[in-house]
Image (tube, coloured by chain):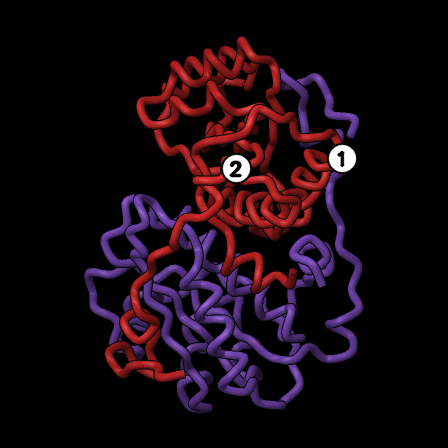
Chain colours: A purple, B red
Amino acid sequence: MSAYQTIRARLAVRSFKPDPVPDGVVDKILRAGRWAPSSRNSQPWHMIVVRDRRTLAELASLTPSGGFIADAPLAIAVAMDGARRAEFDAGRLIENMVLAAWDEGVGTCMVGAFDGAKVKALLGIPESMELVTVMPYGYPTEEAATKTKLRKPLAQIAHLERFGRSWEG
Amino acid sequence: MSAYQTIRARLAVRSFKPDPVPDGVVDKILRAGRWAPSSRNSQPWHMIVVRDRRTLAELASLTPSGGFIADAPLAIAVAMDGARRAEFDAGRLIENMVLAAWDEGVGTCMVGAFDGAKVKALLGIPESMELVTVMPYGYPTEEAATKTKLRKPLAQIAHLERFGRSWEG
């Protein structure tokens, strides 16, 4: 699949088969993050791979919206270290990881809310760093792999030369 | 190229050939953005395509670090509208656009600093919206297409189960 095809096809996945994600695939996801652009190439990020079942269950208990982490074979935490634009750079890092994962048949889903202090303590992340997310990864169940992706029409969000003059494409 | 190969190969490009970027390619870049994930699928973004030479020159004059916009055949401004996580979602949107562009042979580069009020006035972007960036797009010059991409070793940024225990891959 080309990058565009992957971008087009990718779905948010919240239910996973129990099959483990092999080291080689995890490595590719991490490397895709590593190649992301960042402000002044500062690469202000850390990725923590979690596969220990007890840790996954504890992580699931530290988020109001990501309980499904407990049922995933893998999660990857992302923390930013002294970043000038932490959220923006994290978005670019994570999008790379998500797309590389999808290319390998692996799905994931952003989880936005955590008890950050407890997650950092659990994973040994220095207090000074900013926890962005812990995202579960795994092979999607049949149902999760066949959803429809809804988006606004392009004409509503794309403009030509000036805001309000619609891009017709 | 697969998504990973595109992610691996992509370079930041600051010097462009004069050749225009065809409508079909611009459309693909915009669509790649449109398919990005966002907080609660809110899609809180707008993209403004600029090809008018005078507008490009004015945009270049409104950034201390992006003067090269004046020499690009195309720029795309991104503004966020009432986003819960504007910077994070913008990072995901823009990474999709950047990768889809690269797949078509088109390069770009993040430009971080702008006189936002003046850019919004110039492009008619409502005051209430948040300007994230205006990025130039175009076909890279020979020199721009053959740079080396430097990154920290993976072992320095990837950890296994706990921060500080290096992922060996």
Position in image of residue A68 (x %, y %)? 57, 76
Name which residue type carries label 1.
Answer: Gly
Q: Which residue is mark 2?
A: B140
Q: Quadrant of residue A154?
A: top right
Position in image of residue A96 (x %, y %)? 52, 59
Q: Which residue of the protein is positioned furthest toward the top in this rendering?
A: B54
Picture quarter with the C terminus of chain B:
bottom left
What secondary structure is found at the residue carrying circle 2? loop
Left or right, B148 with respect to B24, comes to left
Left or right, A93 with respect to A67, comes to left
**Which residue is rendered at x = 19% and y = 60% of the image?**
A128
**Which residue is rendered at x = 61% and y = 19% of the image?**
B51
Q: N-terminal of the two: label 2 or label 1?
A: 1
Rate crowding at label 2 as few (under 14), some (14 to 19) or many (20 or more) other CA atoms within 10 Å. many
Q: Which residue is mark 1?
A: B24
Picture quarter with the N terminus of chain B:
bottom right
Q: Chain of mark 1?
A: B
